[in-house]
Image (cartoon, helix red, strand yellow):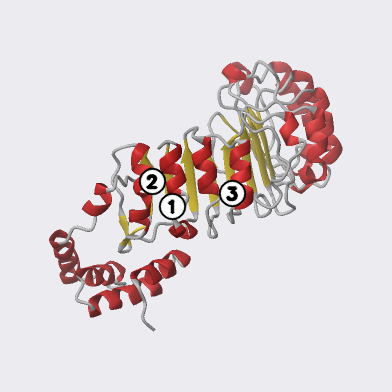
Amino acid sequence: MNLTWADHLDAIAAAPDDDAPRLVCADWLMQRGDPRGEYIALCLDQLPTPEKLSRLAAVKAENDWLTPLLGEGAQSFNARVDGVPEFTRGFVESVGFFGRDVANLGAVLRREPITSLRLTSGGTGPLARAGSEPELKRVHTLRLDGRHTEGTAAVLAAPLDALRTLWMTNFTDADAQGAARGTGKPESFSAGARDLTTGAGLGAFLSRVTELSLTSVSSGVVTTLELPEVMHTLAFHQSPLSPAAMHALGPRLDHLSVFACTAFPTHATVPTLDRDSVRALITHVKSGRLVKLDLHGMSSPAFEELVCSPVMKGVHELDLSDGSLTADLARALMRSDWLGELRLLVVRENPLEVTSRLVLPGVSINDRRTELWD
């Protein structure tokens, strides 16, 4: 079989944790006298010796596989600007593009098995051009920054067959239409949604989502969301939820293991959950599957009613890091009969004179976020 460079990139991207396709590619390159084959093989050597490490450094110094990527404007995935992509086990797997350089995406996708991609701004034209690249089918993790909605919609309409994680600054109606046309079905989806007017039609796009996080989404949109049974984590940020929205989520709430409804203290002028919204939550959450609850910006009556309800019976971790914990609310916590499973209470940003008086047997009380399990 006559393999091509593209065939090798496809195989590597399809099994990013497997060294076998990389070694096959290394052999293929060495048969053609390409020094990168030796470089890849040395990177993957399980028994490196000082001689092999010296040879690896020499091969890397004698050859420059990075400059062509930099010439196309490729940056590191995590750096917004001026970051340099890194080689991992012989290849570059993650890159970012900023501004007009987004238009050069295709050239880099054809050079390396890119599975993690970040596109920042770039304008409608470059983003639309990026969306036409067939090599996007290899991308597992995609981050889209900026507000150029027509361009991001074109990217979402691309053949994102391998997509697992999607993060967007702003997910709009145009993006929803693009996602409906594309093949991407992420397992984890986080997005700002201030310009989204309906969640109708997103059922297929969200069908594999296990973790969903939406920021600045309206209650009206929440009432139209079609959420899959596989979802175990649901988070809303800066999004006060009406009782109607909570009732629309309905049975899905009782299948969750993690639920969050948060707001920054400086933005919490409207409660994230009022008393009627909490009562809707209490109506639907009864199974004890919920193990982590992250709530900021609640009204005091709503908080008192929640912590003294069966919603709390399976909760291991409760995060109240918004500075609104009062002495009355602390007393409500201490008299609740439903905190038998609670192991961690996070109270960052709350007054020390309140948190220092909390006594909850068997519960670790922290003023900063920590891991629940060692």
The image quarter in which residue 321 lies: top right
> Where is residue 150 drawn, in percent x and y?
52, 38
- Side of 346 where 246 appears, left or right: right
Q: Which residue is mark 2?
A: 77
In the image, 365 versus 325, the foreground residue is: 325
Q: CA distance from mark 3 to mark 1?
A: 14 Å
Q: Which residue is mark 3?
A: 188
Q: Give the amino acid type for the residue marked by disc 1 in the picture.
A: Ser
Disc on the earlier residue, 2 or 1? 2
Q: Which mark identifies residue 116? A: 1
In the image, 132 versus 183, the foreground residue is: 132
Check if mark 2's residue and mark 1's residue have beta carbons within 8 Å: yes
Q: Which quadrant would the N terminus be assigned to in this image?
A: bottom left
The image quarter in which residue 126 lies: top left
Check if mark 3's residue and mark 2's residue have beta carbons within 8 Å: no
Disc on the earlier residue, 3 or 2? 2
Q: Give the amino acid type for the residue marked by disc 2 in the picture.
A: Phe
> Where is residue 24 drawn, in percent x and y?
35, 77
